[in-house]
Amino acid sequence: MNNNQLSQRDLAVLWHPCTQMHDHENFPMIPIKSGKGVWLEDFEGNRYLDAISSWWVNLFGHSNPIINEALKQQIDTLEHVIFAGFTHEAGIELAEKLVGITPAGLTRCFYADNGSAAVEVALKMSFHYWQNRGEVAKTKFITLENSYHGETLGALAVGDVALYKKTYAPLLMNVITAPSPDCYFREEGESYADYSTRQFAHLEKILQQNAGEVCAVIVEPLVQCAGGMRMYDPVYLKLLRAACDKYNVHLIADEIAVGFGRTGTLFACEQAQISPDFLCLSKGLTGGYLPLSAVLTTSEIYSAFYDDYTKLSAFLHSHSYTGNALACRAALATLGIFETQNVIEANAVLARKMHELGQRFLHHPNVAEVRQTGMILAIELVKNKQTREPFPWQERRGLKIHRFALSKGVLLRPLGNVIYFMPPYVINEEELTLMFEIAWQAINR
């Protein structure tokens, strides 16, 4: 079987995510036969460096032997069992570990299947909490401009990327949208912290005016990923936590993309020394192996649902594969690597190398900004460096970069005109250098 044969079979029956399938009439689908470490290999022996961790999920490389072994042991014991009225060791142990490593005060773990589902759970829990407490006027959510929280209708409603949201607007609940702390728009000479503080004043005013009808504020801590890897300072989170307390509103931290070491700490919220009321986790949770998400919340929120059944206060949200044993075991193996291999310290070394390699792009005539938070680095391409005029989206420059990079053996998938790197943590300096070199060639081309 070769690439072309598999590609044709694929196009006859499949519909791929986030894809205009018409593009594949003249740009072949790439069938992957195997993966090892940061490398993927197709059916004709071509290799591709996975610079984006396969949509940000892969932490410790493809076919990681530690996670492989854990799954082999689990599959001979239990693959899955209904998680209502039943439980299992992997699900219990994973919840214990998540409660132990997440910010203080998060004592309860609710499992779901993916990141969007986790956001749905947090939104529903927050709304339902206020209903159970008798504060029935609280029905709205505050979100940030340029935010992204997933593709299901609730998650889509609290996002603000028009590309994904606009078509479905008639189906979505109304939300209150606050200006983003996105530091790309700071004044010349203004620090990240100063701009983030200045932008928070807008959100505080919204809270002051609307707190009585607001359930929660939902944010992506430190990095708005799908919105172009836009970044802001931890001071914003610190101010937000204080304001949510002051105005009696929940804080939902969507760390689906930025959790598990991506920002330089295990969780991004740590950099602001805050604890949210809800922490949404997925993607890297299983090391990129299996779908699983978790929502961590507080004893206070849990207690609002804990009562006699006839009170009808229970949280009845469910998924058939909630707490899947195989996924929980993969997650435990992933967390075990963090425990035994000083991952955060090793990532700091890799992040410094990424910073060093990124300096080359600063003076490029079509680069407006090079920004970095931990193991995430982004390069903003523009038509005019002085005015920051973007390239017209219709030119699809990111797609051209993607195709060129693939031809050179690197998987980049830019977000519009933003090239970003979010590699697996097992990447080495030689591979990092290759990744940046191909991006440089792609921009110049």
Image (tube, helix red, strand yellow):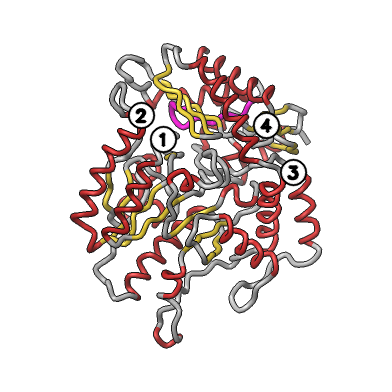
Tag 1 near tag 2, CB within 8 Å: yes
Q: Please name the residue shown 43% across and 24% down the image.
A: 380
* Amino acid carrying mark 3 in the image: Asn
Q: Return the x and y of residue 171 as percentages of the image width and height.
A: 33, 56
Main SS class of the magenta portion in the image: loop
**Spatial distance from mark 2 to mark 4, Cα to Cα?**
28 Å
In the orientation shown, which residue stands out farthest toward the left? 209
Give neighbour class at mark 1: few <14, some 14-19, many 20+ (Cα, 10 Å). many
Asked if disc 3 and disc 2 are in contact, CB closer than 8 Å, the reply is: no
Q: Quadrant of residue 275?
A: bottom left
Label 2: element kind = helix
The part of the image, by quadrant, that contains residue 429 is top right
Distance in Å between CA atoms under marks 3 and 4: 13 Å
Q: Which residue is mark 3?
A: 64
Residue sitting at 45 percent across and 56 percent down?
119
Q: CA distance from mark 1 to mark 3?
A: 30 Å
- Residue 86 is tagged as none
Left/right placement of residue 217 relative to residue 285 reads: left
Query: How busy is the neighbourhood of tag 3: few (under 14 within 10 Å), some, or many (20 plus)?
Result: some
Q: Which mark is residue 184?
A: 2
Q: Which residues are magenta?
A: 410-418
In what element is the residue under mark 4? loop
Q: What's the mark number on residue 427?
A: 4
Other residues around mark 4 within 10 Å, as few (<14) / some (14–19) / many (≥20): many
Give the Cα separation between the discs numbered 3 and 2: 36 Å
Q: Which residue is mark 1?
A: 231
Mark found first going from the N terminus, 1 or 2: 2
Badge 3 vs badge 4, beta-carbon distance below 8 Å? no
Q: CA distance from mark 4 to mark 1?
A: 23 Å
Relative to residue 110, is residue 161 depicted above or below? above
